[in-house]
Amino acid sequence: MRAAVLQEVAEIYVEGLPRRYPNLKLVEEPLSIEDVPVPVVGSGQVLVRVSACGVCYTDIDIVEGRVLCKLPLIPGHQVVGRVVEVGKEYSGPVGTGDVVGIAWIGWTCGKCRYCREGLENLCENFRATGCHIDGGYAEYTVAYGDYVYRIPRGLDEVHVAPLLCAGAVGYRALKLAGVSDGHRVGLLGFGASAHIIIQVLRSLYPSTEVYVFSRSAEHRDLAKRLGADWVGTPSEEPPRRLDRAIDFTPVGEMVSRALELLGRGGRLVVNVIRKQTPIQLDYATHLWLEREVKSVANVTRRDVEELLSIAGKYGVKTEVQIYSLDKVNRALVDLKAARVRGSAVLRVA
Ligand SMILES: [Zn+2]
Ligand SMILES: [Zn+2]
């Protein structure tokens, strides 16, 4: 089968961006398109013929070595495809012919205290798809049968892919933010995740006021069309203070800005793995009056299931930019250069 393989960590070359890792090779094509054997389905696993796979900013973190994974690696953790074989000792609800999704949560131990407390996203032995386990940048992939999700009817395979990470993690951030109907909610940054979450907000909490902060005029336009009540740049003042905020940006300064925008008792959730610049907080300006800040890590299976079900019920739409598997390196460069509107998705079959 054809697969896009990461053989070694490298810095992705994007014209105009400064070099960050002088010790790494600087390349335009970090993944090689290779012919590799179709993976063998193991006990408890299913073999999936991949139709589409979303490209996530985490894949850039993986390529550039900020998230450590096995090597060589087939990345890709927003996988949609059809089950073609079921391994021994799998007796779950999914069978041959079903269209399923595979997300970042690839396997958890079920035994550590986090798994036992319903926080399998924090499992001490967490194994991620497209990181510790080969993922969906390939014609076939295997997944543990208990970690795949039926795709609701009415959602097509390419457009559903971004729901599996951008959507699911954003949804977890929304749950952690503790939004209730009537809140004023700020979304800082408006890329793959936020453009899904605004639709979830609009569907679940119709009386919330949603303010979107983005440097990109194109992203602000998209936010308006998707129902934002107010849009502006991060330095502009919104009409009123926020009750809840979710920061989707890699910029450290955005954390202090978001906290400034919160009213009393407000909560900020930071939905990003790594901030590229430092976070500087002043207790009186940013935290006093019971304002709080929280991060979000990984997803639980329940997050993915709930988000897929909400998307099916309310018809959540994703904006996608489609690439073929051969053009995966182009997708990574475009994503790093912030040239992708919505989400980048590989159409594999
Ligand atoms: Zn992701
Ligand atoms: Zn565990």
Image: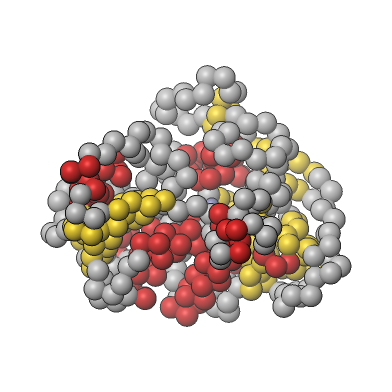
In-image side of 115 versus 200 (left or right): right
The vertical placement of 142 against 8, above or below, is below
Camera-nearest residue between 44 and 139: 44
- Residue 32 in view here: no
Q: Position of residue 133 (x, y in %)?
A: 71, 49
Q: Residue at x 45, y 40 (%)?
A: 274
Residue 4: % across, % down:
69, 44
Q: Is residue 150 above or below residue 44?
A: below
Q: Residue furthest front?
A: 113
Is 253 on the left or on the right of 45, as rendered? left
Residue 211 versus residue 224: which sits nearer the camera?
211
The x and y percentages for residue 267 are 29, 57
Q: Quadrant of the C terminus?
A: bottom right
347 or 315: nearer the viewer:
315
Count of numbered circles on the image:
0
Residue drawn at (22%, 39%) of the image? 282
Q: Quadrant of the rendered structure where residue 102 is?
A: bottom right
